[in-house]
Image: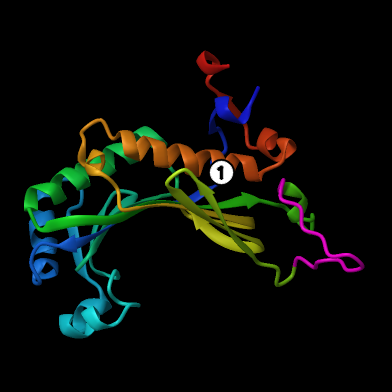
């Protein structure tokens, strides 16, 4: 069996799966209109809306601060998922337990169709998929050996305490940022999970008009990159412990 045929894991390590779409607004006040328009469209899926702290900062100041430009001002909350809305970005996050790619894609397409109907987007800037995973590890078992990534420094040994590795990969039009950190603790549903953080963020700059197409071909391409990157970061024994499910049709 190959990584290419690996479809899913029975024991999902996903803590949060996030899709973000950044854009240039059609009018300067688009950020003031988005929350109400999207809530009207999506309230059956996301019945609760909250204003976030960034919304209290005047829009003129947000526009001048690169750290605030894409920050969400409002949050729409549903069952195990949420939509975040800002002046120049919208996103949907699936919380644990992760329902799988078909359900995640369905939520993304629903959001994008709603955004498109507002006519408040002038031009897409980028979109991204980010999967925040924690591989469970019990006791004091070493965690870096769970990875296929090798780190070496002649004459020295890396301690896992305080270790953090970040690097970037390029595949076709996609840039993927990987962050690896041992000994983290996260919350999945109502339970705490301790183990190895594997954070994979795949970004596509300046997407073409295909981005808006109903079949979601560009979304499928990006999701395939982030998924295969994550699988390739783990050793065969780590994958086996998580219960791999293979697509036998492609083997």
Q: Which residues are drawn in magenta?
A: 147-160
Say above or below: 62 vs 48.
below
- Apparent side of residue 168 relative to residue 75 in the rendered image (left or right): right
**Residue positioned 26% across, 42% down in the render:** 211
Indicate whether residue 212 is drawn in magenta: no
Indicate whether residue 149 is drawn in magenta: yes
Quadrant containing the C terminus in the rendered view = top right
Residue 12 location (% of width, % of height): 54, 41
Number of marks drawn: 1
Extreme residue in the right direction: 155
Query: Looking at the image, which is closer to me, 172 or 154?
Result: 172
Label 1, residues with CA under 10 Å away: few <14, some 14-19, many ≥20: some
Residue 180 location (% of width, % of height): 63, 59
Residue 197 location (% of width, % of height): 60, 57
Q: Is residue 36 visible?
A: yes
Q: Can residue 99 be seen in this view?
A: no
Query: Looking at the image, which is closer to me, 65 or 173?
Result: 173
Task: Name the chief secondary structure element in magenta.
Answer: loop
Residue that badge 1 annotates: 229
- The colour scheme applied to this rendered structure is rainbow
Residue 215 location (% of width, % of height): 25, 30
Query: Looking at the image, which is closer to me, 103 or 228?
Result: 228
Q: What element carries label 1?
A: helix
**Residue positioned 57% across, 28% down in the render:** 4
Quadrant containing the N terminus in the rendered view = top right
**Residue positioned 72% across, 35% down in the render:** 236
Q: Quadrant of residue 121?
A: bottom left
Q: Quadrant of residue 38?
A: bottom left
**Residue positioned 41% across, 42% down in the render:** 222
């Amino acid at each position: 069996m190959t990584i290419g045929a690996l479809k899913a894991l029975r024991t999902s390590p996903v803590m949060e799966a996030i899709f973000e779409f950044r854009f240039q607004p059609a009018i300067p006040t688009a950020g003031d209109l988005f929350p109400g328009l999207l809530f009207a469209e999506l309230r059956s899926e996301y019945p609760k809306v909250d204003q976030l702290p960034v919304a209290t900062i005047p829009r003129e100041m947000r526009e001048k601060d690169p750290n605030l430009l894409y920050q969400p001002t409002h949050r729409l909350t549903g069952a195990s998922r949420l939509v975040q809305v800002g002046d120049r970005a919208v996103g949907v996050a699936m919380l644990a337990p992760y329902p799988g790619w078909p359900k995640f894609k369905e939520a993304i397409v629903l959001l994008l169709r709603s955004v498109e109907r507002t006519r408040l987007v002038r031009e897409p800037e980028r979109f991204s998929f980010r999967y925040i995973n924690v591989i469970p590890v019990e006791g004091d078992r070493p965690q870096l050996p769970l990875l296929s990534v090798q780190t070496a420094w002649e004459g020295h040994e890396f301690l896992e305490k305080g270790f953090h590795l970040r690097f970037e990969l390029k595949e076709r039009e996609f840039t993927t940022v990987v962050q690896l950190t041992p000994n983290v603790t996260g919350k999945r549903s109502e339970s705490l999970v301790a183990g190895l953080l594997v954070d994979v963020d795949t970004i596509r700059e300046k997407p073409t008009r295909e981005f808006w197409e109903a079949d979601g071909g560009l979304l499928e391409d990006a999701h395939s990159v982030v998924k295969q990157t994550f699988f390739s970061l783990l050793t065969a024994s780590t994958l086996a412990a998580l219960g791999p499910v293979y697509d036998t049709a492609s083997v």
